[in-house]
Image (cartoon, rainbow, N blue to C red):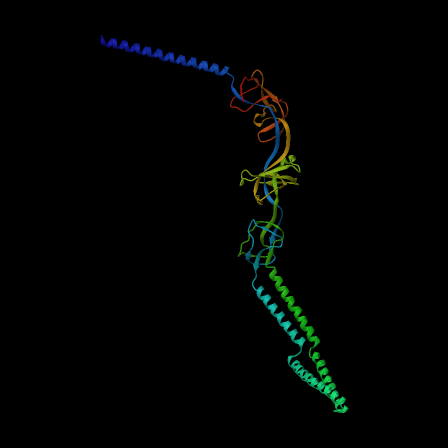
Amino acid sequence: MAGPLRLVRVTRKVVTLKKIVLALVLLAILAGGYWTYQFKTTPPTVPFAKTQRQKISNNLSTNGKVEPQDFTEVRTDIQGLIRKLSIHQGDTVSQGQVIAELSQPGLDQELQTAEARVAQARAELATLSSGRPADLAEIDGNLAILRKQREQAVATVDTLTSLVKKQAATTLELREAQDAVSVLDTRIQALAQRRPLLVNKSELDAAQARIRETEAGVALAKSHLAQNAILAPMSGVVYDLPAREGTYLHPGDLLGSIGKLDPVRVRVYVDEPELGRVAIGQPVRITWDALQGKDWQGTVDKRPTQVISLGARQVGEVLCTIHNEGPELIPGTNVNAFILTQVVENALTIPKTAVRRERGTGVYTLQPDGTVKWANIITGASDALHVEVTSGLAEGDSVMLPSDQTIHEGTKVRATY
């Protein structure tokens, strides 16, 4: 009897377990149906934003490159080794300042030789101007003797004149003494007239010509040396300096570049479809990734005259003048450019993300009964986040923002802001 009784008990337990499982399944089905019904009847939650009045600035965002507004390249006219480089990149220089010196073999020796020739020519002229030394010495010696004799003869005349008055000497003795003075004067005058004849005028002219020739040689040698000094052709900042001391330069080689860097010119690359928005005088803001948080201001100076290829883009080059105190912007720098093409005060705006392209340009608006309705709009100016609505909406209207819900016109929604 124990075996059949145990079997009956097991059978009862299995039946009870099946009933429990069946009850749980029915409960789950009922719960699923309830939640499905709730899901279908509860409006989806969708984000909205209200239209608002604000100032909107329409910026054209692109890129550009910095250039000096006024610059010159410094190139050498001669060849030689850079013996001394007096500047560094970033230095401010003045026009005419020596910025480098070149070394050319033989120029120092050329100048020394020319100066020696001048000294020799001048010595020759001095010799000719003063006569032949030996002959002049002889004349000078004879003149000294004759002048001494004349002094003595004049003293004798004075003595005899006094004695004649006292009748202690005869007039014949006095006359003979006077004649002796006259003879000495004649001899002295003859020697004095002979002295200049020792200097030949044609020889003097030739000597002076040699001096002029040798002095010209000195000037030429100095001009060659002066060419070794490279001068700054303008005042400004050395913004490019490829040359180094010890570099050998040939005629036409680039030593460096000097320019005025305040203000600078920025060549802004504007895509062809956007060129119609650009006008002369529009404000421009420049940023540089290397100096975060810093910007520079300027204006558009010149619109492009042609469209060129820039990589895969077709762009026009818009020239802008940018104030550059410091200066901090460096020529050749790639920068970000923002051209303010339009400013609208008190514009009616909505977030850009609310605008859709389904049946033209429009938005979904929230109706008083909680449903959404499509509204066609006309847009105007825009900035990075907002767009102006010129037609189709009123102030205070609610427009639907993007969500993961599938919404159609007439859908009832629960709005969040």
The residue at 66%/70% (across/down) is: 211
**Residue at the left extreme of this rendering:** 1
Residue 377 or residue 97, whichever sits in front: 97
Q: With 172 as the anchor, is 257 left or right in this view?
A: left
Relative image position of residue 41 (x, y in whole percent): 50, 14
Relative image position of residue 95 (x, y in whole percent): 62, 53
Answer above or below: position of 383 versus 123: above
Using the rendered view, name the quadrant where residue 81 is placed. bottom right
Residue 300 or residue 192, whichever sits in front: 192
Answer above or below: position of 254 versus 408: below
The residue at 62%/63% (across/down) is: 222
The residue at 62%/35% (across/down) is: 340
Using the rendered view, name the quadrant where residue 192 is placed. bottom right
Q: Quadrant of the C terminus?
A: top right
Q: Quadrant of the N terminus?
A: top left
The residue at 63%/66% (across/down) is: 218
Relative image position of residue 334 (x, y in whole percent): 56, 42
Using the rendered view, name the quadrant where residue 214 is placed. bottom right
Q: With 319 as the anchor, is 29 left or right in this view?
A: left
Answer above or below: position of 113 versus 142: above
Residue 307 or residue 102, whichever sits in front: 102
**Residue at the top extreme of this rendering:** 1
